[in-house]
Image (cartoon, helix red, strand yellow):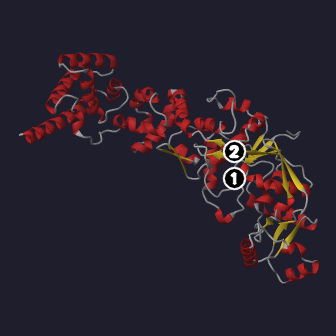
Amino acid sequence: MTDRAVRVRFAPSPTGYLHIGGARSALFNYLFARHHGGQFLLRIEDTDQKRFVADSVQDLMTNLRWLGLDWDEGPDVGGPYGPYTQTERAALYQQWANWLVDNGHAYHCYCSAERLEAMRAEQTANKQPPGYDRHCRHLSAAERSAIEAAGAPFIVRFATPRTGDTAVHDAVRGEMIFSNSTLDDVVLLKSDGLPTYHLAVVVDDHFMEISHILRADEWIASSPRHVLLYQAFGWEIPVMAHLPVILDPSGKGKMSKRKVRVGDKEYPVFVEELRSEGYLPEAVFNLLTNVGWSMGGDREVFTKEEAIAGFDLTGINAAPAALPYGKLEWLNGVYVRNLAPAELKRRLIPFLAAALNLDAATLAENPVLDILLVDVQERIKTLSEAAAMLDFALIEALPAYDSKLLIAKKLDAAASQQALSATRAALVSLGDLQDPEHVESTLRGLAETLHLSAGQLFGILRIAISGKPVTPPLFTSMKALGATTVLRRLDVALAKLAALNYFLSGVST
């Protein structure tokens, strides 16, 4: 820890969409800030303009907020240390790059792309480690003046110490020692005046008063360069904590950048895809919190508030952590079942409207959804599953279904038609289908009269009203549909059975 007020940042590069690995880094920063009553910043590190993806910033912001990771300072909310987008801070980087040059910690490099390419080819041929050969570091003042008088473009490189070691103190991994002889003279400022990551991150973290740097372990190799830059500037070094790498669920390698397969199921790795497939933000938040950190004991389900209360750097495990995708559907199902019915309805409506091409406002007023909601809640694991379960009740006409599904086990088409016809007559006599228990009792009695099992009769009826063998409870579904719709669908089913019986009778003769 440090005596400084806790200020942390999530600083993504907008070169792609929010990956679940990046979301885990953002989440740990958020939890740490909230646990210590500190500030959580969002900073957009967009100096790599060649790889910039136009809509990635909006994707990052939208999906961080969907996860519940609200930031105290950032590009859209402002703050006293802005701007929070690096391309808007170019003058600051140039100022401090020049300071390093003026104070002997950096130098102008005039090497052309062609020279650098030839140098790398020679190193490869000689089986030497790649890296800049420091040609321009040793130019005399007169040589520099002559080159710059000719208008040659240049970049700024850091004058890395050639001897000694650099110690990186990591709150998760302990002290890490790097030999300076293995570090090259890294580029700090490109010829277009924009900084590289190494200069920008150090300058920004200093001037934004970042107290702790929690970032992916892929930046461990860069950490000695950053420490050397802090020392050159004479600035206080934030506490560093490099987070454990996230492994594929198999535990045999880093997680894919595209898709993850567990058994015969593919899972997405971008937060937007998880969102669109109907996973709840609470479940994804809970899942990611358990990757590299633990509440302790066997506790797997907990609230955001509980995670904030328990989170600290001492609980982070440095060992690589496999992402337990296999638990995601189970965990999501737990959160779905814990939602209040009104909240579940609110979250389901966008999925149902999109999948079934229905108006969301009209859907919100449809009593059918309210009647079936509780039963659906017990059966779905993701919000996107509800459409296939409820389509028969929410759309006016049933999709086409195979007439043969109406034939019950151990019956033929004629017997199934007779059973369904008797069922229709019984339902007409009831008039109102709003008492599921009474409807069920009546039809069980009818099944006995017809010398059928309840399963046979109810199976025919279920297909007739829904076109599918699995639905929410049959009699609750009939209540939701209402007598008029149920009888109309039974008439369609009877016509199908009549036609099928006629066809099969013709075939048999």
How many numbered discs sit on the rendered protein? 2
Query: In the displayed structure, would residue 59 be above or below residue 50?
Result: above
Answer whether residue 127 is visible to the viewer in this image: yes
Labels 1 and 2: the sequence-earlier one: 1
Q: Are marks 1 and 2 in contact (CB under 8 Å)?
A: yes
Dot 1 amino acid type: Pro
Q: Position of residue 312 (x, y in %)?
A: 76, 35
**In the rendered image, which residue does mark 1 sit on?**
12
Dot 2 amino acid type: Ala
Q: Quadrant of the N terminus?
A: top right
Q: Residue at x 21, y 36 (%)?
A: 492
| Snapshot quadrant of residue 353 | top left
Secondary element type, mark 1: loop
326 or 350, nearer to the observer: 326
Q: Position of residue 176 (x, y in %)?
A: 83, 48
Label 1 CA crowd tier, 10 Å (few <14, some 14–19, many 20+): many
Distance of mark 1 from mark 2, alpha carbons?
Answer: 9 Å
Q: Residue at x 59, y 46 (%)?
A: 248
Query: In the displayed structure, would residue 267 be above or below residue 407?
Result: below
Query: In the displayed structure, would residue 504 be above or below residue 419?
Result: below
Say whether residue 358 is left or right of residue 441: right
Q: Position of residue 87 (x, y in %)?
A: 74, 61
Say whether residue 413 is left or right of residue 311: left
415 or 278, nearer to the observer: 415
354 or 111, nearer to the observer: 111
Answer whether residue 74 is visible to the viewer in this image: no
Label 2 CA crowd tier, 10 Å (few <14, some 14–19, many 20+): many
Q: Which mark is residue 26?
A: 2
Q: Residue at x 90, y 77 (%)?
A: 139
